[in-house]
Amino acid sequence: MQHTRHNNARKLFSEIDLNPQNYLIIHYSCESFYDIKDGHTPRITSIAVYAYATAQTDSFSIHKVAEKSHIQISDIELHYDELEKKMLDEFFAYAKEHSNFFWIHWNMRDINYGFKAIEHRYSVLGGIPYNIPDEKKIDLARQLINCYGVGYAGHPRMEKLLEQNDIKAKDYLNGSQEAAAFANKEYVKLHMSTLRKVDVFSNILNRAINNTLKVNSKWTEIYGISIQGILNYCKDTWWIQILWTFISMVIGAVIGEFIGKII
């Protein structure tokens, strides 16, 4: 039921708030799978990992590896597999070093786009990926649905959520813009967008934790239509709490006066 999904999401947000040092936020950019004609899996261009407790970001990108290998950006395409393999070597070494952490992500769920897609791409390039356990992965997109219901934002949800909350996201690219950037070999632009997105996800998570995220959902969509859902709504609504406290004080005073007269 919705009130159970909502409560579980709130508990998870509270746990993240209490122990932020245990959580990382990850996002990556890649070649658009809609533009691939020969069936190969999308090439990875950059990965960003944001430490929630410190706001420090580690990044792995094709253009940085190229720079260390003394290869010009204009020549990346000629050495892409070699550079991508080195980039993923670095990422999976990092992932193994952070095996005790939880990884917060946005819709990184399957072989098309997700952890499995990165692992598969690394395998194709000859690497042996470190598999992050599923129980260590937290899909922020799904948790927001659990917390607020499916109608919390329009589609595309991330862009609409930014608009609703007046979050200015410099360097942020949407899906079609990322595809165009890859086609134009604008790897730095893609990298900047990836960095911005983990920062945006942190911002949204903060607001969800503090219960200040602006959503389109009605209270019935958030809490569900049940007695427990209504009780949860009352518990979480400040003016109802104040009203209930006032009513309780009045009732207590009336009962006290009545008992006093009887005695």
Image: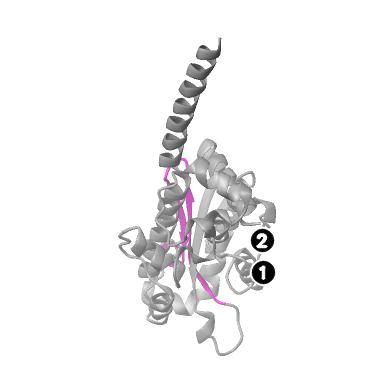
Indicate the position of residue 111 as horizontal and vertical percent values: 64, 72
Q: Secondary structure at mark 1?
A: helix
Q: Badge 1: how crowded within 10 Å, few (<14), some, or many (20+)?
A: some
Indicate the position of residue 3 as horizontal and vertical percent values: 61, 52
Instruction: Write the residue at 66% across / 61% down.
Output: 129
Relative to 247, 117 lies left or right:
right
Q: Is residue 227 magenta?
A: no
> Which dot marks residue 123?
1
The alpha-carbon separation of the residues under discs 1 and 2 comes to 7 Å
Instruction: Write the residue at 51% across / 53% down.
Output: 25
Q: Is residue 191 above or below residue 50?
A: below
The answer to which quarter of the image holds residue 71 is: bottom left
Q: Which residues are magenta?
A: 42-64
Question: Are the residues flagged by discs 1 and 2 in contact, CB closer than 8 Å?
Answer: yes
Identify residue for label 2.
129
Indicate the position of residue 250 as horizontal and vertical percent values: 44, 27
Between 252 and 208, the residue placed more toward the observer is: 252
Q: Is residue 53 magenta?
A: yes
Q: Amino acid at mark 1?
A: Ser
Residue 70, visible in the rendered structure: no
Between 202 and 257, the residue placed more toward the observer is: 257
Q: Badge 2: how crowded within 10 Å, few (<14), some, or many (20+)?
A: many
- The residue at the far front in this view is 262
> Which dot marks residue 13?
none
